[in-house]
């Protein structure tokens, strides 16, 4: 049996990841699967947040391009 008190959110499972906050336009593109260009971050995985600080998921920055990283 699963104890609900022991579950953690997907967001908190990646507490050791740095984060990126997207503006409104970037959020719309990112959630539609469009890669975001000219991201000034190191190549790595990041927690991605929208313009209102809502957690969207994980993204991968590679050569200044941010892409959605699907977990399933």
Image (cartoon, rainbow, N blue to C red):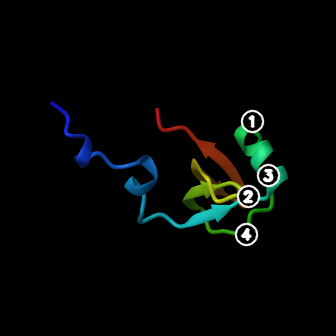
Comparing 64 with 56, the one in front is 56
Seen at 69% across and 54% down, the residue is 50
Mark with earlier residue (3, 2):
3
Q: Check if mark 3's residue and mark 4's residue have beta carbons within 8 Å.
A: no
Q: Check if mark 3's residue and mark 2's residue have beta carbons within 8 Å.
A: no
Mark in the foreground, 3 or 2: 2
Task: Classify mark 4: helix, strand or loop.
Answer: loop
Does the image show residue 35? no
**Residue annotated with mark 4:** 40
Mark in the foreground, 4 or 2: 2
Q: Which mark is residue 32?
A: 1
Question: With respect to residue 18, does 48 lie above or below?
Answer: above
Q: CA distance from mark 1 to mark 4?
A: 21 Å
Q: Is residue 63 left or right of residue 54?
A: right
Q: Is residue 58 left or right of residue 64?
A: left
Mark with earlier residue (4, 2):
4
**Residue annotated with mark 2:** 51
**Residue annotated with mark 3:** 26
Give the image location of residue 57, x and y in percent.
56, 47
Comparing 19 with 51, the one in front is 51
């Amino acid at each position: 049996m699963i104890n609900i008190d022991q579950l953690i959110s997907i967001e908190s499972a990646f507490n050791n990841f740095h984060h990126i906050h997207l503006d409104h336009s970037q959020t719309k593109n990112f959630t539609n699967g469009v890669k975001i260009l000219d991201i000034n971050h190191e190549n790595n995985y990041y927690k991605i947040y929208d313009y209102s600080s809502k957690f969207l998921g994980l993204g991968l920055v590679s050569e200044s391009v941010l892409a959605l990283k699907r977990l399933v």
